[in-house]
Image (spheres, grey):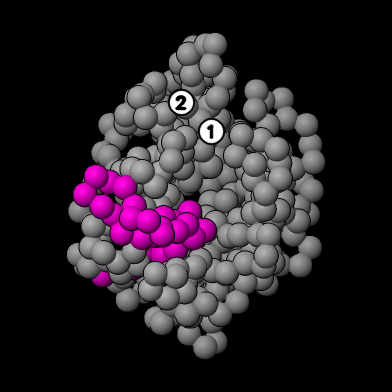
Amino acid sequence: MRRAGVEWAAADGGIPTNLPDGRVAWLYGDTLTGRIQSDGSLAPGFGLVRNSMVIQQGRCFTPLMGGSQNARTSLIPAPAGFWYWPSQGVVEQTGSGNVLRLFLYRMTTGDGGEFNFRLVDMQIATFSLPALQLVDVRSLPTGIQSGPVDSWGASVLVDGSTVYLYANGSGNRTSQDCDPDRERRVARVPLGQLTTGPWEFFDGANWSTNQATAAFLQFVADTPPPATACSVKPWDTLNAVRSPNGGYAAGGKLGELPPPHTNSLLGTEISEWTAQAPQGPWHYRGKVAQTSPPWPNPDDQYTYGARLLFDLPGGTPTMLYSVNSFGPLGQNVWLYGVNFLNPSLPP
């Protein structure tokens, strides 16, 4: 598709959502638009939109963006000074038919860090089905706070008639971890009530409607981690899925690095965690894959957003992750995108 001249050139994310009619909606964040030239560069006049979607029907892939030919815009527009990155999608049934709900990171600039962006809050976009027309973008249900340390909906698990919503960060409490952003918490809500609630939060023993009681999820080292890893908690979001072997599984980057390096973004280990319940405890089972190319590499690439999937066509366990570069991507779009590999899962 990237070579098909449809202006959709490269993007990160690549999170699939199965639609009721058999199609798959692949959700993407920052998307390079334009024509790819023979050397991998983009022709002059290329653009960047903040979100897009690719609809798969069998072996056919159709990109969805806003705007018009040679003047593409984000599929989900945002007010001036903000943009949306999608995290995950859920199909819900309403009185007027099925809809696709997309959890969104509402972002803006100005944290002063390496990438100079920050999360404002989490919101929910609704698309009609089967037309996939944007209906609205709204805040989380009344009373639920979200922000840089409360990213509810950073990942989502649909388990029967219940939706589990994971959050990154430590909320308003002190984390004892080496990296406070590694704390994970979970809420749940009946399918069909994502935008209305009530949501319930796991407090470490029971479920409560009081968000302030949401406890840090527990992570246990069944397998010894690398000596350079500061934690067995995932560096990536806890992207939980149902395991065909029973229980639940999640794949993600561990965030290990040989000293003296401290940037977990450059870690290469992709690990697996398992649990008997969505709220854990989650058991670290060790390395199951490695990002490619391994660090360090000549193109200054880094990787993020790893997740484990069992329900792609073919039924083989698949790991996907995003690869990016510190260099000018317009000169080589092949340094940016989503990679797929087959992990070596322990029995």
Q: Image check: 189 left or right of 146?
A: left
Q: Quadrant for the C terminus, please.
A: top left
176 sits left or right of 37 in the view: right
Residue 94 in percent (x, y) is at 54, 82
Would residue 216 be seen by someone viewing this image from the given angle?
A: no
Q: Is residue 25 left or right of residue 80?
A: left
Q: Can residue 39 be found in the magenta stretch?
A: yes
Q: Secondary structure at mark 2?
A: loop
Q: Element at badge 1?
A: loop
* Residue 168 appearing in the image: yes
Q: Quadrant of residue 68?
A: bottom left
- Residue at x 48% of width, y 54% of height: 30
Q: Amino acid at mark 2?
A: Gly
**Extent of the magenta region:** 28-57
Determine crowd level at label 1: few under 14, some 14-19, many 20+ residues with C-alpha closer than 10 A: many
- Residue 76's label in the rendered image is none
Q: Position of residue 36 (x, y in %)?
A: 28, 54
> Circle 1 is placed at which residue position?
235
Residue located at (47% from left, 80% from top): 133
The residue most toward the front is: 44
Question: Residue beneath label 2, please?
Answer: 267
In the image, 51 versus 150, the foreground residue is: 51
Residue drawn at (64%, 41%), measured in percent from left and top?
116
* Coordinates of residue 253 in the picture (x, y in percent): 45, 33
Q: Residues within 10 Å of mark 2 (few under 14, many from 20)?
A: many
Q: How many angstroms separate mark 1 from mark 2 (CA)? A: 9 Å
Q: Are marks 1 and 2 in contact (CB under 8 Å)?
A: yes
Of the image marks 1 and 2, the number of the one nearer the N terminus: 1
Q: Residue furthest bottom?
A: 96
* 126 vs 107: above or below: below
Amino acid type indicated by mark 1: Trp
